[in-house]
Image: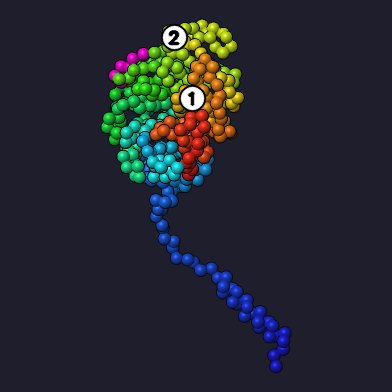
Amino acid sequence: MISKQFRWWGVLVILSTVMMGCGRTVKPPPATAVAPTPSTIPSDPFVSVSGETLSPTELRATIAARPQDHFTNISIQEDIAFLSHGKRLIILDISTPGQPILLSEILFQKQVKRIQSIGQKVYVVLEPNNANETELELQIVDVSDPLNPSKQGYYRPGAAATDAVVIGDTAHVIGWDYWAVVDISNPNDPTMIGMIDTGIFCSRCSRNLEEIKGYLHLSNYLNRVSHTYVNVYDVSNPLNPEIVERFAYPTSSGPILAVGEDVYTFATHYGVSFQVLDLASESSYYNVAGELVSELPEIFSESSYYNVVGELVLELPETFIQAGRLAAIDHYVYLASSDGLYIIDVLDRFRPSLTSTLYPNAYFSGIVQANGFIYLLDWDNGLIILDISDPTNPMEIGKWKQ
């Protein structure tokens, strides 16, 4: 007769054997690689602007960095909206304002600095990735089929360029002492056709370009308390640009919006203010403190100054106001700021008044008026569409966020 103690030992041995068998390591068969699908990655993600292939590591790093990206630029072309978000160009169908739809997106290796949509092309200005790089890039994207955008040619200036803008079939790329004229009539092969000597060199200046009503505005400013000096060029002959106007905005100003004989802008000198500048009557400029500005750098000695005919001081954080944050509807100016949306009545140009504010604490990086709507770009939250049937009381009718 087998004792109870022996029987228990037998049970333990059997259980141990079973457990050891269950815990045995079995080498699995080799894993099968699965190709990424269009729903999981953006269009054309493996190819850089220069045509180089991104490694899987680089691709994963780029995608992993997305949560830190922000919405920085907006451009509207009929019923299509183009947004920049970090290193991506996003294309939306806005034909139904209440329900924007994502059509496609395209990825670059560098952050997007500026976008311009003209016809069936989008011109994307890409910033250097770090302080050790100096080359800005201009990439041309074909959006004739918004569902399948494709990269075409690109241009690298080979110098320390700071900005670029497209007017007609020509791209103008600038640096501190650099102005390259690039023929983009063949979008697959952008070609530099000349250099322009502006006679201006300022290694400590910020230089920005804007296309306003077909004219090229080249702005120079030293710091946030200095004046912004502007040359306005007629570039109908790209290799022989003609200065048609020279003037200076008071203090370090933000974006400009020209409406008739008035120019609206921000000024950031000891605070933030909205200013109305008179372009009709030329005179000496007296700043907000009542001080006559008489001493200019030699290269700007022939600049004209315009009176500030109206000013409204705003309680805004002192932040850098980038281009593309102003829009006008009737006699109202919309200021898309880093602290919400401000609506200002400029019917009395000498006494602009604040009508209302919306979205307090929102950080807006762009604003466009088109199709009878206002399109706001929120730094973190994407696109907001406003019905402006009543300009003093715009109503949100749609939004989109990635």
Q: Residue at the far bottom: name it.
A: 1
What element does badge 2 sit on?
Answer: strand
Query: Residue at the spot x=59%, y=73% of the render?
Result: 20
Check disc 2 and report the residue beneath it: 281
Residue 30 on image: x %, y %:
44, 63
Please provide the residue range marked out in magenta: 237-244
Q: Amino acid at mark 1?
A: Tyr
Question: In this rendering, does residue 377 appear at all?
Answer: no
Bin the neighbour count of mark 1 within 10 Å (Cα to Cα): few under 14, some 14-19, many 20 and up.
many
Residue 384 as seen in the image, left or right of residue 49: right
In the image, 76 versus 342, the foreground residue is 342
* Residue reaching furthest to the left: 186
Q: Which residue is mark 1?
A: 332
- Could you say which disc has been placed on residue 138 in the image? none
Above or below residue 349? Residue 95 is: below
> Label 1, label 2: how many angstroms apart (C-alpha)?
23 Å
Residue 15 in view in this figure: yes
Q: Residue at x 42, y 26 (%)?
A: 163
Between disc 1 and disc 2, the foreground one is: 1
SS at circle 1 = strand
